[in-house]
């Protein structure tokens, strides 16, 4: 057998090995939010919005694995959007446990932020809400 004959076998073994190294990822919830973990989450989401101000509930991601953040529109004195229409689509994030790491994933592009000051547990309902 030549090296050329073994190449397809090598590729198959390599692909099988990569698949076995995949990290288990499960929907998660924040288990015990603290001021520090809420600050971390707010910082990550603010960063995801290019440092634009966002507001999050204190119980964000404690009951659902999905966080939906709407951008605030500029309003006139009567509370209407300045140009009469909303343009921005809400941003969806999901909280996952990847191995033992708690990560926030922006669904639109898959960007991930590791939450190091936040304790997460698997979502008992399984799939992200």
Image: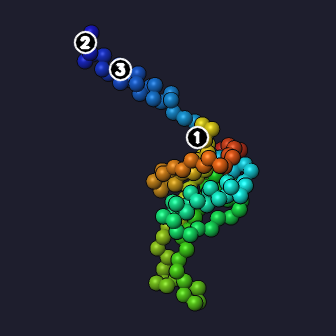
- The answer to whether one can see residue 85 in this image is yes
Point 52% across, 68% down: residue: 52
Above-or-below relation of 115 to 20: below
The residue indicated by pointer 1 is 98
Point 51% across, 33% down: residue: 22
Looking at the image, the residue that sits furthest to the front is: 36
Above-or-below relation of 119 to 80: above
Identify the disc placed on residue 2: 2
Point 73% across, 55% down: residue: 34
How far across and down, in percent of the image, does residue 50 sit?
48, 64
The residue indicated by pointer 3 is 10
Q: CA distance from mark 2 to mark 1?
A: 41 Å
Identify the disc placed on residue 31: none
In this rendering, would 11 be left or right of 112? left
Marks 3 and 2 in Cβ contact (< 8 Å): no
Foreground: disc 3 or disc 1: 1
Above-or-below relation of 104 to 77: above
Neighbor class of circle 1 (other Cα within 10 Å; few <14, some 14-19, many 20+) is some
Looking at the image, the residue that sits furthest to the top is: 1
Marks 2 and 1 in Cβ contact (< 8 Å): no
Disc 3 on helix, strand or loop? Answer: helix
């Amino acid at each position: 057998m030549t090296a050329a004959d073994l190449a397809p076998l090598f590729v198959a073994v390599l692909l099988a090995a990569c698949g076995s190294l995949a990290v288990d990822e499960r929907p998660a919830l924040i288990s015990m939010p603290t001021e520090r973990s809420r600050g971390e989450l707010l910082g990550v989401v603010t960063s995801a919005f290019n440092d634009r101000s966002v507001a999050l509930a204190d119980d964000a991601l404690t009951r659902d694995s999905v966080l939906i953040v709407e951008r605030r529109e500029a309003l006139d004195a009567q509370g209407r959007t300045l140009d009469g229409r909303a343009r921005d689509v809400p941003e969806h994030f999901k909280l996952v446990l990847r191995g033992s790491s708690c990560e926030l994933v922006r669904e639109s592009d898959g960007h991930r932020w590791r939450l190091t000051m936040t304790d997460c547990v698997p979502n008992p309902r399984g799939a992200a809400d």
